[in-house]
Image (cartoon, rainbow, N blue to C red):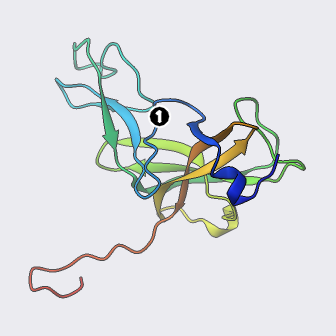
Amino acid sequence: MSDSPAAASTLTRVPIIDGWFTDDVHAPHLIGSKCPLCGTFVFPPRSGDCPSPFCDSTTLEPTPISRRGKIWSYTENRYTPPPPYVPTEPFEPYALAAVELEAEGLVVLGKVATGVLAADLKVGMEMQLELDVSHRDAEHEYVVYVWAPAAPSTTTTLEGGAA
């Protein structure tokens, strides 16, 4: 098996966990669930009763959730985790970040993009969702969501100047 870009282009992209994120390479989104009655969000997505103790809804609907948030906490993982994670050989430590999605009131844990270490992170740092290849086999390229330092957002004021 080759890890070259040419070989990867013939592989079928498969999410490592189906239904947790979109496969849009330019603007991926996590997929959560939302209560249609009270607006409570959950991640990962699920069906069933609303988790809010103040709501008696028995329905949760799949919904895209924010792709940007701020680091709530982070750490560096220095041991090989269990499946479905497939480690590199030799195993290389990587950062994990718990990212707060303010609009949904959620904190979502995820691996940080390759090459970004815990020493590069700070609580409150803006992060954005990206996709990365976890591993490959002879037929598939397994894709996982990761948190990466967010590109600076450019906003425009009502007068047309940069904010």
Where, quadrant-wise, is the N terminus in this rendering?
top right
Describe the element under mark 1 as helix, strand or loop. Answer: loop
From the viewer's side, name the closer residue of 7 and 52. Answer: 7
Q: How many marks?
A: 1
Residue position marked by numbered label 1 in the rendering: 20
Residue type at mark 1? Trp
Vertical side of 66 occupied by 127: above or below: below
Where, quadrant-wise, is the C terminus in this rendering?
bottom left
x and y percentages locating residue 153 in the rendered image: 35, 72
> For the point 19% across and 25% down, which residue is it?
36
Mark 1, other Cα within 10 Å: few <14 / some 14–19 / many ≥20: many
> For the point 40% across and 21% down, which residue is it?
46
Q: Quadrant of residue 43?
A: top left
Residue projecting furthest to the right: 90
Residue projecting furthest to the left: 159
Vertical side of 120 occupied by 56: above or below: above
> For the point 68% across and 61% down, which residue is it?
118
From the viewer's side, name the closer residue of 2 and 112. Answer: 2
> For the point 25% across and 76% down, which residue is it?
155
x and y percentages locating residue 25 in the rendered image: 47, 54
x and y percentages locating residue 67 in the rendered image: 39, 52
